[in-house]
Image (cartoon, grey):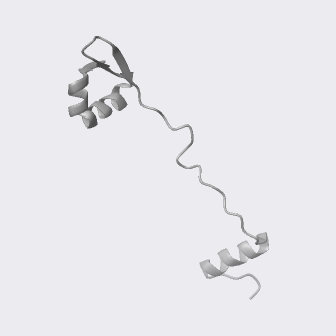
């Protein structure tokens, strides 16, 4: 675990954040001796979690659209 001074962390913020991401925790120490932990926050939702689309369309219409896009129609 890395320990940075406040000034060093401020000057190298990007690399300090990268280090916190890779190691899970970085400590920052102030002149008066107080120490703070910088811990990355992990997303609570999946990046694949997308909002649904409300559409007034029936299953038959969806199937018909898919088949027409694929160039196939049934019974025609």
Identity of the residue drawn at 66% across and 74% down: 66
- Relative to residue 9, is residue 73 depicted above or below? below
Left or right, residue 66 beside residue 60? left
Residue 28 horizontal/vertical position (percent): 30, 21
Residue 29 horizontal/vertical position (percent): 28, 17
Answer with the quarter of the image where residue 56 lies. Answer: bottom right
Judging depth in this view, the residue of 4 and 43 nearest the camera is 4
Left or right, residue 21 beside residue 68? left
So how many labels did they put on this image? 0
- Relative to residue 20, is residue 52 depicted above or below? below
Identity of the residue drawn at 34% across and 30% down: 22
Left or right, residue 35 beside residue 74? left
- Relative to residue 68, is residue 27 depicted above or below? above
Residue 46 horizontal/vertical position (percent): 55, 43
Which quarter of the figure is the C terminus placed in? bottom right
Residue 72 horizontal/vertical position (percent): 65, 81
Answer with the quarter of the image where residue 57 lies. Answer: bottom right
Which quarter of the figure is the N terminus placed in? top left
Judging depth in this view, the residue of 62 and 32 nearest the camera is 32
Left or right, residue 22 beside residue 5? right
Identity of the residue drawn at 60% across and 77% down: 70
Identity of the residue drawn at 52% across and 47% down: 47
Question: Residue at the bottom extreme?
Answer: 76
Question: Residue at the front extreme?
Answer: 32
């Amino acid at each position: 675990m890395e320990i940075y001074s406040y000034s060093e962390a401020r000057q190298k913020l990007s690399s300090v954040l990268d280090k916190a991401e890779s190691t899970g925790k970085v400590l920052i120490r102030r002149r008066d001796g107080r120490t703070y932990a910088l811990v990355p926050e992990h997303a609570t939702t999946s990046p694949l979690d997308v909002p649904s689309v409300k559409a007034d369309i029936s299953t038959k219409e969806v199937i018909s659209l898919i088949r027409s896009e694929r160039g196939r129609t049934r019974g025609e």
